[in-house]
Image (cartoon, helix red, strand yellow):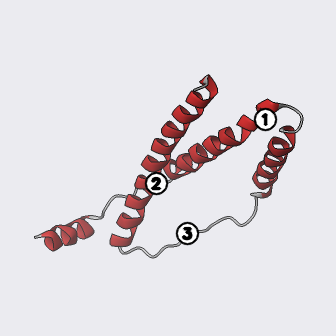
Amino acid sequence: MSNITIVIIAGALLSTLYFAAGYWRGVRNAIADFRNGKDDQGTVPQNGHWAGIALAFLTSIVSVVGIGYASWFIYVGPFLVLVTTVGVGVAFFFETKIELSPEAAQKEQNRSH
């Protein structure tokens, strides 16, 4: 196995663990929010994503076209996947942690007995 393959595999394992930890945190937040009885959907910004979309699109184009110019561009795709996975994992940690309210915790405890 080449060094770059080992780096990509190690990066994939680390980024997957980070993503899974963030996803688990997001699931726990969603369950706690539901059990607290809140139905607040919050506001989702509808603008301001165009720069990120353009950057992702341009990076993908460069990585695919670059393979025709230099063979090392073949490794850009896997690294983009790793960066994306970590980026999504980070997004889960930006959300503030939601704790169960005392009432919801009591209901949960009564349900388990």
At x 41% / y 60%, what residue is drawn? 27
Label 3 – label 1 distance at C-alpha:
41 Å
Q: Which mark is in front, 2 or 1?
A: 1
Residue 37 position in % (x across, y down):
36, 75
Between residue 109 and residue 81, name the one nearer to us: 81
Label 2 – label 1 distance at C-alpha:
30 Å
Residue 104 position in % (x across, y down):
26, 69
Give the quadrant of residue 102.
bottom left
Q: Secondary structure at mark 1?
A: helix
Q: Which mark is in front, 3 or 1?
A: 1
At x 37% / y 59%, what residue is drawn? 28
Other residues around mark 3 within 10 Å, as few (<14) / some (14–19) / many (≥20): few
Q: Which mark is in front, 3 or 2?
A: 2
Give the quadrant of residue 107.
bottom left
Between residue 112 and residue 39, name the one nearer to us: 112
First along the sequence among labels 3 and 1: 3
Q: Amino acid at mark 3?
A: Gly
Between residue 27 and residue 60, name the one nearer to us: 60
Q: Secondary structure at mark 3?
A: loop
Badge 3 vs badge 2, beta-carbon distance below 8 Å: no
Residue 89 position in % (x across, y down):
53, 48
| Figure quadrant of the N terminus | top right
At x 61% / y 41%, what residue is drawn? 82
Q: Is residue 92 above or below residue 104?
A: above
Left or right: residue 6 versus residue 17 is right
Residue indicated by mark 1: 73
Q: Is residue 99 above or below residue 85?
A: below
Residue 42, numbered label: 3
First along the sequence among labels 2 and 1: 2
Between residue 49 and residue 76, name the one nearer to us: 76
Residue indicated by mark 2: 23
Q: Secondary structure at mark 2?
A: helix
